[in-house]
């Protein structure tokens, strides 16, 4: 059984979140949560929330309650919409500031069918 959780429009660049998602991909759930807890990046807090939400969704679907039974099957970070802001540059020109966002997706699997 698989359970999915998503955090859409997270106001952090996907390039900052992808290394954290790659770190936990394929890990057992307790190990992934411990890894995220000790990681001091801001993205680790967001990914940890999504992993916990996916685990809660698995329990709600009537799956097993043991967290040792689950592992992180998919941890994907996609690019969300970009807010385009700007500031004046040299000689009166426009210098863009791109405020990027990301969509974080985590799929937990229990290894069974």
Image (spheres, helix red, strand yellow):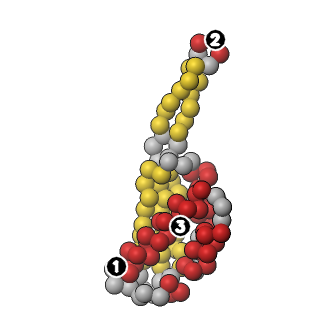
Q: Nearer the viewer, residue 109 or 66?
A: 66
Q: Quadrant of the C terminus?
A: bottom left
Q: Is residue 12 left or right of residue 38?
A: left
Question: Residue tagged by mark 3?
Answer: 48
| Quadrant including the N terminus | bottom left
* Number of residues whose C-alpha sits closer than 10 Å to that of mark 2, classed few (under 14), some (14–19) or many (20 or more): few
Residue 59, percent from left and from top:
38, 81
Q: Image height check: is 113 above or below 42?
A: below
Secondary structure beneath label 1:
helix
Binning the other alpha carbons within 10 Å of mark 3 as few (below 14), some (14 to 19) or many (20 upward) gives: many
Give the crowd class for mark 1: few <14, some 14-19, many >=20 residues within 10 Å.
Answer: few
Tell me if I can see residue 113 in this picture. Answer: yes
Mark 3 or mark 2: name the one nearer the start of the chain: 3
Residue 93 at what x, y percent from top left?
58, 16
Which residue occupies 66% across, 61% down?
40
Q: Say whether residue 84 is left or right of residue 40.
A: left
SS at circle 3: helix
Going from N to C along the chain, the mark reached first, 1 or 3, is 3
* SS under mark 2: helix
* Depth order, front residue of 106/86: 86
Reading the image, the residue beneath label 1 is: 60
Q: Nearer the viewer, mark 3 or mark 2?
A: 3
- Where does label 2 land, which residue? 91
The residue at 43%/62% (across/down) is 6
Against 53, is 7 above or below?
A: above
Q: CA distance from mark 1 to mark 2?
A: 59 Å
């Amino acid at each position: 059984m698989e359970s999915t959780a998503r955090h859409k429009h997270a106001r952090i660049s996907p390039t900052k979140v992808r290394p954290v998602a790659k770190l936990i991909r394929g890990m057992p759930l307790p190990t992934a949560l411990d890894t995220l807890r000790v990681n001091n990046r801001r993205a680790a807090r967001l990914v940890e929330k999504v992993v916990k939400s996916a685990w809660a969704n698995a329990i709600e679907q009537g799956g097993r309650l043991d967290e040792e039974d689950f592992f992180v099957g998919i941890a994907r970070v996609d690019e969300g919409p970009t807010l385009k802001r700007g500031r004046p540059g040299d000689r009166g020109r426009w210098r863009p500031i791109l405020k990027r966002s990301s969509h974080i997706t985590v799929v937990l699997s229990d290894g069974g069918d």
